[in-house]
Amino acid sequence: MTVSKDRLAKMREIAKKRQFGLRVVLEELENRLNISAICRTCDAVGVQFLHVVHRGVRPIVLDKRVSAGSYQWLKVIQHPTIEDCLKELKEMGFRIYCTHVDQTAKDFTEVDYIGKVAIVFGNEAHGVSEGARKLADERIVIPQVGFVNSLNVAAAVAVILYEAFKQRRKAGLYENPELSEEEQEELVQMWLHREKAALSL
């Protein structure tokens, strides 16, 4: 398959805006529609690295209609435990924000998303684990005034990531590439390979 110049140019332009310093961590999510919608939101705001903890390392099952093919554009990194995941991110210099409803949690709009930040979202029924809460630098919450005290996890990811997007865009992080030219080209080559593989199915 020959890739058009326009298609290649679009991939390279998108690669420039990919965010090394903004990560999403999914802990034990079960619903494939939620995971699919989250992949789509990650791609939309330039999140390239999605960290997944799911009962050891298991293949991720998606709904292709909901994800709209966004999964193929992401780098999904799977971890055996949440402790392994968050300790690895901390060693890389990331601050850990954990979504959790309690009195210590800060309004999600009142924390800084401009540096290296990883945001942890937990299981649909139980939320984030105690292990994740202990390792978090901040607990964050989306304020609500209705009868329920939490959003669907895919909706919560979208709300918080767009706050991060707003802050990071204002800081110029989408105009000044975080990835080196070599890393950008590696992404483009990965995307080309995956696109060719998808079209050949």
Image (cartoon, rainbow, N blue to C red):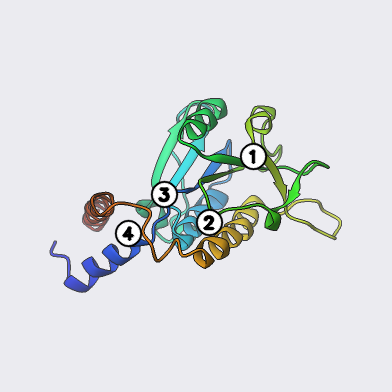
Discs 4, 2 touching: Cβ within 8 Å: no
Name the residue that disc number 3 marks: 20
Amino acid type at image mark 4: Ala
The residue beneath circle 2 is 37
Image point (58%, 35%), residue name:
28
Q: Earlier in the sequence, mark 2 or mark 3?
A: 3
- Give the vertical position of 86 relative to 193 (above or below): above
Q: Read off the residue under disc 1.
A: 123
Report, in whole angstroms, how far the alpha carbon at label 3 lies from the one at label 4: 11 Å
Point out the tag, 3 or 1, that comes first from the N-terminus. Answer: 3
Tag on residue 65? none
Instruction: Count residues near mark 4 (Cα–Cα under 10 Å), then give few for <14, some for 14-19, many for 20+.
Output: many
Q: Nearer the viewer, residue 32 or 177?
A: 177
Mark 4 / mark 1, whichever is N-terminal: 4
| Location of residue 196 in the rendering, given as x and y in whole percent from the top left corner | 21, 56
Q: Is residue 173 left or right of residue 34?
A: left
Q: Which residue is mark 4?
A: 15
